[in-house]
Amino acid sequence: MKGLKGAALAAVVLTTLFLAGEGPVQAQVGLPDTVTDPYRRYVQAQDAGDADAALAAALEAWDNAVAADIDPEVRKALGTNAVDAARNAENWPAVIRLAEPVAALHDGEDELDTAVAILELGLEAAFSRLDRVHYDPMLATGLDLLASHDAVGSGRLSRLMRPSPPNSHLLLAAVDVDAVSARASDRQEEGADAAIAYVNAQTARRAVLTLDGEFEEAFAVLEATIGQLQDWGLDQPQLFNAVFADVSGLLVSSGLAPDGSGADAFSQEARVAWCSYLSRRPAVLAEHDLVEYPARAVERGYEEAVVVTDLRIPATGGPAEILSLGAFGDGTSIYANAVRDRIRGDRFRPQCDPAAGALEVRRIDGFAIVDGSPGRSRVVTGHTFAVFIRLE
């Protein structure tokens, strides 16, 4: 995998935690020992060339800093440090876990390239490990960050969208997802890592069955995944967001629930999880909610765009109200019109509770043309990325 420039990242941490060789900043800003002690161990391990020990210490410093809610600038430095340590140790699960929260801290105008580099590394790692749990939030953070600074262009977006979402048919065809799922369900790893591995493997397995038209088997895998997470006592939105991301399309394709909330298609236990998901994420009554890459944009040489749309969706479902829409990049009107037309044509599933309040969400669409493999012409990959984030 392409790595980050370790020297540049390490410099951020050293200048943040140490002042001109005078020792830790603890004396000046009151950093707790739970942060400075593992940081010292990280430095010692780095000097000794022990990549695994350096990563363990860097992660401890980062986790403790987050738990203590210390200064964001110090957290940013520690997190960047931990990402670089994870890259050096070739610990890709650690890279994946760190990339989104650390990149989000690099929100300054002059920090965008660092944020993109961190997210690019995390997305490539997530792609290689079929990790849908982290991939979507990671890419959404990158798109939102570029849009908020009106910085779409110069190849930044193409770098983020180069690794297609890890449900790629070609990737899945090369992976023994049954074996991956079996290993994960044996819980050879502990805690959250085991649950994430299990969800990713089962989601990949379901995607293969859906592509093959085996809808009944795909839905059985879905029910089994929900039941296993409930048995483990893991009712975490991040996990279920990944589990249910493409389920409305499966309900449509299979004919199990072409309209309505779809709750009746599930067992009683799984229904609770599905209804909870609908209360925080809208579900489109279609096989997918992607926007086809506008041909006119390709013809005119417009290569990157992000469209950010805030929506209000009534609890009874149906069409969404567009609260605002902003487009960033070249040829923005073409992309904006494509997204607007799609949204106006969409119908959303109602929530399970018809008395619930309207759901207000942000939809982020990304478009990019990226270089194909060596010897091939440039191609549009993934043609778009769309994710919904609940507005608070």
Image (cartoon, rainbow, N blue to C red):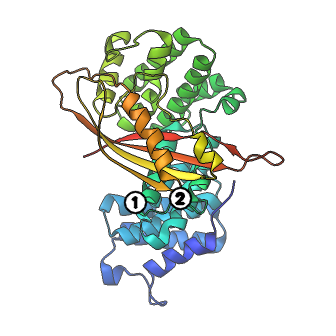
User: Of the residues shown, which amino acid type is indicated by label 2?
Assistant: Ala
Number of labelled discs? 2
Disc nearer the start of the sequence (1/2): 2
Q: Is residue 28 visible?
A: yes
The quarter of the picture where residue 230 lies is top left
Q: Label 2 crowding class (10 Å Cα cut-off): few <14, some 14-19, many 20+?
A: some
Q: Is residue 94 above or below residue 226?
A: below
Q: Which mark is on residue 56? A: 2
Q: Report helix, strand or loop for mark 2.
A: helix
Residue labelled with disc 1: 148
Q: Is residue 340 above or below residue 266?
A: below
Q: Report helix, strand or loop for mark 1.
A: helix
Q: Residue at x 49, y 63 (%)?
A: 151
Relative depth, front residue between 333 and 135: 333
Drawn side of residue 386 relative to residue 51, left or right: left
The quarter of the picture where residue 29 lies is bottom left
* Mark in the foreground, 1 or 2: 1
Q: Residue at x 47, y 21 (%)?
A: 249
Q: Residue at x 44, y 57 (%)?
A: 147
Q: Label 1 crowding class (10 Å Cα cut-off): few <14, some 14-19, many 20+?
A: some
In the picture as drawn, the residue positioned furthest to the right comes out as 375
x, y percentage for residue 145? 44, 58
x, y percentage for residue 28? 32, 84
Q: Is residue 19 above or below residue 68?
A: below
User: Of the residues shown, which amino acid type is indicated by label 1?
Assistant: Ser
The quarter of the picture where residue 86 lies is bottom right
Q: Which mark is on residue 87? A: none
Q: CA distance from mark 1 to mark 2?
A: 34 Å
Relative depth, front residue between 383 and 275: 383
x, y percentage for residue 296? 59, 43
x, y percentage for residue 311? 30, 39
